[in-house]
Image (cartoon, helix red, strand yellow):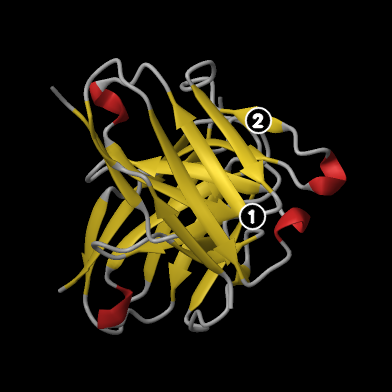
Amino acid sequence: EVKLLESGGGLVQPGGSMRLSCAASGFTFTDFYMNWIRQPAGKAPEWLGFIRNKANGYTTEYNPSVKGRFTISRDNTQNMLYLQMNTLRAEDTATYYCARGGMNYWGQGVMVTVSS
Amino acid sequence: EIVLTQSPTTMAASPGEKVTITCRASSSVSYMHWFQQKSGTSPKPWIYDTSKLASGVPDRFSGSGSGTSYSLTISSMEAEDAATYYCLQRSSYPLTFGSGTKLEIK
């Protein structure tokens, strides 16, 4: 069974940093692209970016809205996906999800609140 | 960036009623994908590659379209179909979602 479990969310001050994690299980992790998506309360999801699979060299693509501030990485020995978020702003407040490949599996999400 | 415009934004349908939700793209896309989301839960894949139903999706749902115009149709509304539906394009970076259609049961 495919499982994705995000962690690491919480409250952070504006200008601060936070790293989210996503633990993956139930599939061959290196075979799949992995995405990060966020969704502010009551709004549509926003794709943040993905990291490609082994066959495609684990390269990354980002939404211009977060490029330069957010970094996606993966630890293929631990089946972990990461989202490093820097210089956080109030508008980054949202539920953050990891999703596999074509977004056919999603985690339950983790809440990030940016506030002083 | 390809902007996806969904209509209507909200709607209510009676049990048994036919429902159509549209998603218009600002530029042509190869396929459209749809997600269903209920309050407090993650979006669920619902229709992929324009017209293929995800696992477990009832066959009263269908998807169609091409180019810049796509739609999700429910042939006969049921109470369990009340949710918010989002379209997604993966043809061009950044991947973009529509703004959503909230579907309620009358």
Which element carries disc 2, helix, strand or loop?
Answer: strand
Q: Which chain carries label 2?
A: A
Residue drawn at (27%, 71%) of the image = B82
Does residue B98 appear anywhere in the picture? no
Q: In this view, does B52 lie above or below B76?
A: above
Q: Which chain carries label 1?
A: A
Q: Is residue A115 left or right of residue A60?
A: left
Residue drawn at (63%, 72%) of the image = A26
Q: In this view, does A67 lie above or below A27?
A: above
Q: Which label lies toward us, 2 or 1?
A: 1
Which quadrant would residue B30 be assigned to in this image? top right
Q: Do labels 2 and 1 share a chain?
A: yes
**CA distance separating discs 2 and 1:** 22 Å
- Counting labels gives 2
Q: Residue A61 carries which label?
A: 2
Which element carries disc 1, helix, strand or loop?
Answer: loop
Image coordinates of residue A58 in percent, x first then y, are 76, 39
Image coordinates of residue B34 in percent, x first then y, are 50, 58
In depth, the one of B71 and B32 nearer the eye is B32
Q: In this view, does A110 lie to the left or right of B12?
A: right
In depth, the one of A23 and B37 nearer the eye is A23
Local packing at callout 2 (Cα closer than 10 Å; few below 14, some 14-19, many 20+) is some
